[in-house]
Amino acid sequence: MMKYLVVIGVIWAVYYFFIKKQPISQNSYKKNNKKDNANDMVECETCGTYVEISEAIISNGKYYCSKECVR
């Protein structure tokens, strides 16, 4: 009987430490991909040029490529 409990304990430990931890690494993968959203492109409301969100100028909830287009 004791042998069965040890085998079940070893199987549970292997499952817990190797299989159950995989979703955690998948969640960290998703978090790292959120950083890539800064590289998404948006269209300038005035001239239609595409510019990265990190470089765009936001005015009244709209994206612009330069100060000239904001005017």
Image (cartoon, rainbow, N blue to C red):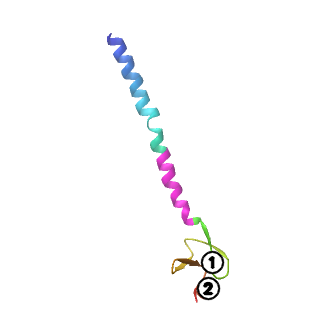
Q: Amino acid at mark 2?
A: Cys
Q: Residues within 10 Å of mark 1 (few under 14, many from 20)?
A: many
Furthest-right residue in this view: 48
| Quarter of the N terminus within the rendering | top left
Could you say which disc has been placed on residue 61 in the image? none
Q: Amino acid at mark 1?
A: Cys
Any magenta on residue 21? no
Magenta stretch, main secondary structure class? helix
Q: Which numbered disc flags the more N-terminal residue, 2 or 1?
A: 1
Q: Position of residue 42 (x, y in %)?
A: 61, 71
The image shows a total of numbered marks equal to 2
Residue 71 higher or lower than 26, as above or below: below
The residue under label 1 is 44
Q: Position of residue 49 (x, y in %)?
A: 67, 76
Residue drawn 42% across the image and 23% down it: 11
User: Horizontal placement of 52 versus 25: left or right?
Assistant: right
The residue under label 2 is 69
Residue 15 higher or lower than 1, as above or below: below
The span from disc 2 to disc 1 (Cα, nearest Å) is 8 Å
Q: Position of residue 8 (x, y in %)?
A: 38, 19
Q: Residues within 10 Å of mark 2 (few under 14, many from 20)?
A: some
Furthest-top residue in this view: 1
Residue 36 higher or lower than 2, as above or below: below
Any magenta on residue 35? yes
Q: Position of residue 69 (x, y in %)?
A: 61, 85
Residue drawn 47% across the image and 47% down it: 27
Dots 2, 1 in contact, CB < 8 A: yes
